[in-house]
């Protein structure tokens, strides 16, 4: 994995060294309005980041890529994540500290990861599942060129009734 520079953000490949700073970022309750929970302890997060350091699923078939997002002032503000499947499809996720919402930073970080996935991991289909009420995430995805998947794709991915599947095809480079 490479360090990715965008206009005003740096995406650093996530390692256990980031655990302490990221524990503070991920303890923001606003992030969990629709799903997930904050990490239970710093030790738990360090162990998790150490495991994720393999960058692979347990069966070795998926690449698990995580980048933390750093601002020029040097603080970490969140992460972007991709699960890259052998068929060149990737599922993505992202979380940003609420102090930085509404500034276009998530869009910049996620777009930078998408370009990296297209150029260096040969990804050409992106998808993500979100809770229906998560309008902020929905708007972000729409601005990034994602659209709602078909009912058939929802069934194929076993998407729950409370969730939506958004997809985007990337032009091959
Ligand atoms: C989803 C999440 C990353 C979106 O963050 P965000 O700050 O709303 O997204 P952006 O950084 O793109 O900011 C967009 C807003 O900034 C504004 N903005 C300001 N300057 C901008 C710029 N240069 N470019 C784009 N947008 C800009 C936009 O108008 C936009 O507001 P709008 O949505 O009301 O139109 C964030 O809400 C989050 O971390 N949520 C919790 C975790 C989560 O839900 N993850 C997704 C699970 S599916």
Image: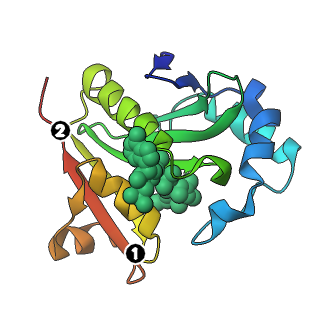
**Residue 100 x, y percent position in the rendering:** 61, 46
Local SS, label 1: strand
Q: Quadrant of residue 33?
A: bottom right
**Residue 168 x, y percent position in the rendering:** 21, 49
Q: Quadrant of residue 173?
A: top left
**Residue 133 x, y percent position in the rendering:** 45, 77
Disc 1 target residue:
163
At 68% from the left and 33% from the top, the residue drawn is 76
Disc 2 target residue:
170
User: How many labels sit on residues?
Assistant: 2
Q: Judge whether residue 133 can be spotted in this image.
A: yes
Above or below, 154 against 140 in this view is below
Above or below, 122 against 139 in this view is above
Q: How is the image coloured?
A: rainbow
Local SS, label 2: loop
Give the class, few, some or many, for how many residues have Cα within 10 Å of label 1's Cα (few <14, many ≥20).
some
């Amino acid at each position: 994995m490479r360090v990715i520079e965008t206009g005003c953000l740096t995406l650093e490949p996530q390692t256990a060294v980031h655990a302490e700073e990221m524990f503070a970022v991920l303890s923001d309750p606003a992030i969990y309005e629709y799903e997930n929970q904050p990490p239970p302890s710093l030790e738990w997060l360090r162990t998790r980041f150490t495991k994720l350091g393999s960058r692979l699923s347990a069966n070795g078939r998926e690449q698990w890529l995580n980048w933390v997002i750093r601002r020029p002032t040097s603080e970490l503000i969140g992460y972007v994540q991709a699960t890259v499947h052998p068929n060149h499809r990737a599922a993505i996720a992202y979380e940003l500290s609420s102090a930085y919402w509404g500034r276009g930073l998530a869009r910049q970080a996620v777009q930078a990861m998408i370009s990296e996935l297209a150029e260096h991991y040969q990804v050409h289909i992106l998808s993500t599942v979100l809770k229906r009420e998560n309008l902020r995430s929905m708007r972000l995805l729409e601005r990034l060129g994602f659209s709602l998947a078909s009912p058939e794709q929802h069934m194929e991915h076993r998407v729950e009734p409370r969730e939506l599947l958004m997809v985007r095809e990337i032009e091959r480079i």
